[in-house]
Image (cartoon, helix red, strand yellow):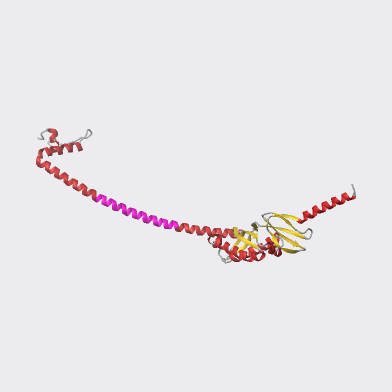
Amino acid sequence: MKVRDYTIIIIVFAVIFLVGSSLYVVDETEQVVITQFGAVIEPAVTGAGLHFKLPFVQKITVLDKRLLDYDTSPRAIYTEDKKNLLVDNYAKWRIRDPITFIRSFGTEVVAQARLDDIIYAGLREELGRHTLTEVISVNREAIMNAVTEKCHNIAKEFGVDIVDVRIKRADLPEENKSAVFNRMRAERERMAMRYRSEGAEESQKIRAGADLMKRSIEAGAYRISEQIRGTGDSLAVKIYADAYRRDPQFYSFIRTLTAYKNTIDKNTVLVLPLDTEFLKYIRSPSGK
């Protein structure tokens, strides 16, 4: 192979290398900042596709367009009522202005460290204005919205949007858990005793009312039954009197037979004189 052939091959490889060093591809989820000798070239490249840069002179820094996660280990924060909480939080953020971002932080790693300071300071300040109960259950949504807004206002100066800050978990330190749980248990027991006492009192009232109603109903029923019984007895006496007036002998006969039926059965033994008035119809059908 001649020298000329080698020269052509070298030139071809050099052109390919230069073209490869000059071209770069930007994904639709990415944005690129170009620096030349350390100075940032504006504007940033945000459109997806194939792009050109000066080889060797210019360098690219690829940044993510999407929402990014910020997460950290639990740290101690004091509430307004002097309760020590171990707060485990996270945040969602994105790079809004890549030029400002690169000038402020340079890399995402540095940005994460700076965001850690901003978010922790915002949490510490805002939670310090609220009690433990408010942080745990009552006003958590409003508190986290306030933290998000405060952190966003600080971070936007660095080209960053903090979209959301949330608490994953808020725990008491181990040395405080037993005391707090015992206090909570005692409080629940006091509430339970109060509810039982109120329930017993209400039960007594209900029973007393039911007993009073029962006695009232029984008294009314007894009065009505006595009235009915009295009416029946009166009617019976009238019937007996009418029957007696119509045929006193027949009435006496029927009444005596009824008495026999009510007092005499196969096991009854009567020891009476034969001339007893009660046995007159046994002695003789005519009763004489």
Q: Say if the magenta span includes residue 77.
A: no
Quadrant in the rendering for residue 235: top left
Q: How many discs mark residues in the rendered view?
A: 0
In percent of width and height, residue 24 lies at 74, 55
Quadrant in the rendering for residue 159: bottom right
Apparent side of residue 280 relative to residue 67 in the rendered image (left or right): left
Apparent side of residue 265 relative to residue 47 in the rendered image (left or right): left
Q: Say if the magenta span includes residue 198.
A: yes
Work out whether residue 80 or residue 210 is closer to the camera in this orientation and state it: 80
Residue displayed at 14% across by 43% down: 239
Q: Residue furthest right?
A: 2
Residue displayed at 42% across by 58% down: 198
Quadrant in the rendering for residue 238: top left
Q: Is residue 243 above or below residue 49?
A: above
In percent of width and height, residue 214 lies at 31, 52
> Of helix, strand and loop, which mostly describes the magenta segment?
helix
Residue displayed at 15% across by 45% down: 237
Work out whether residue 17 or residue 98 is closer to the camera in this orientation and state it: 17
Work out whether residue 209 or residue 58 is closer to the camera in this orientation and state it: 58
Question: What span is colored magenta in the figure?
Answer: 195-223
Residue displayed at 34% across by 55% down: 209
Work out whether residue 74 or residue 19 is closer to the camera in this orientation and state it: 19
In percent of width and height, residue 226 lies at 22, 49
Apparent side of residue 183 relative to residue 220 in the rendered image (left or right): right
Apparent side of residue 180 relative to residue 108 in the rendered image (left or right): left
In percent of width and height, residue 275 lies at 12, 36
Q: Which quadrant, please, contains the C terminus? A: top left
